Image (cartoon, rainbow, N blue to C red):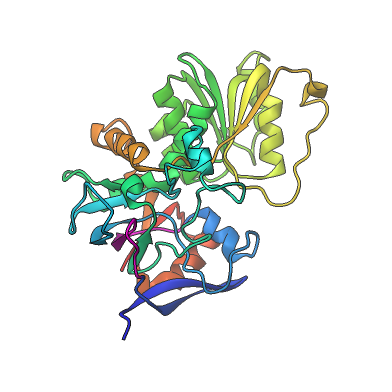
Amino acid sequence: MARMMKAAVFVEPGRIVLEEKPVPAIGPTEALVRITTTTICGTDVHILKGEYPVEPGRIIGHEPVGVIEQLGSAVNGYHEGQRVIVGAITPCGQCSSCLDGHQSQCGGRALGGWRFGNTIDGSQAEFLRVPDATANLTPVPDGLTDEQVLMCPDIMSTGFSGAESGRIKIGDLVAVFAQGPIGLCATAGAKLRGATTIFAVDSVPERLAVSRRLGADVTIDYTKTDPVAEILRLTGGRGVDVAIEALGTQQTFESCLRVLKPGGVLSSLGVYSGKLTLPLDAFAAGLGDHTIVTTLCPGGKERMRRLMNVIASGRVDLGSLVTHHFKLDQVEQAYDLFSHQRDGVLKVAITP
């Protein structure tokens, strides 16, 4: 008899339910991780709503913290019982994309190296099969709790990469549109990169308060003030050096374009559905020397090690992002709360 485990499974649009599934078997280059903490991502809500297609029966989730239960025969440098995290993106380190320096795009065109909860079973379960384990398991330092490192696999890596891809320089003016978990991490990343004025845009007072704690200098409630006009006013009409889009809507993308200086960088992190259009004026008819750059969450063990260094240093404290706690048995309630953004939720911690 195969060992069974509990797991959050995508059934059809509108339904992610708790089911019994077999504990995964692993191959020589893989590892089995016993999940101790995981969480729900905005991308999982896109899946729940049917806005991003995954096959029915897929276990969802891509933000794992756990303990190595079993190692494949070809996996070196780790031992069973070790606490680890695994990035949401699991590069193999050997394909043309990886060897070309684009690890996030590992494996090709279908959203690159994002496998967990997308093309293979994910982390909202008691156990997780990790592919290419030598490249993707990262030991958690003893002094750090599960919750302290829970943001590293995706939210922190994605948000920071928005600041990194935007090529923020010391002294830059930066706007971050949307202060959900990704936008908040982009704000923290912009500060670490040396931005000296950060404008953060959202409408939820609690999010704007967290944003100020993480490095925002000016917070703008877009329901009360036109953020584009306000940012242009506060920059003397110059605009910002870098604008980070952290939601994935036409409006936020366009607002980013409208606040950019000539020659500025629009760093896009959002997951878009449908079409994006470029307004002629904001795009300067294609003559504004703008750079538009998109980024998929960097993964792999070296990226995770660096992010945990940042947490361990105390320079960024993302503990305030975990606002709610659920057991895996309550995962359907957790989805209901998170997808409807009730009760000031930022991120939920889910423990088997």
What stretch of residues is rendered in magenta? 25-40
Q: Is residue 182 magenta?
A: no
Q: Could you tell me which residue is drawn at 71 percent across and 27 percent down?
A: 258
Q: Could you tell me which residue is drawn at 46 percent across and 27 percent down?
A: 190
Viewer can see residue 233: yes
Q: Quadrant of residue 263?
A: top right
Quarter that holds the C terminus? bottom left
Q: How many marks?
A: 0
Image side of residue 290 versus residue 181, left or right: right
Q: Could you tell me which residue is drawn at 28 percent across and 59 percent down?
A: 72
Viewer can see residue 208: no
Residue 121 x %, y %: 45, 65
Quarter that holds the N terminus? bottom left
Q: Nearer the viewer, residue 189 or 106?
A: 106
Q: Nearer the viewer, residue 213 or 289?
A: 289
Q: Is residue 30 magenta?
A: yes
Residue 298 x %, y %: 45, 40
Residue 239 x %, y %: 65, 18
Residue 302 x %, y %: 34, 37
Instruction: Give above or below for 316 relative to 262.
Output: below
Instruction: Give above or below for 254 relative to 70.
Output: above
Q: Could you tell me which residue is drawn at 16 percent across and 46 percent down?
A: 142
Q: Nearer the viewer, residue 37 or 113?
A: 113
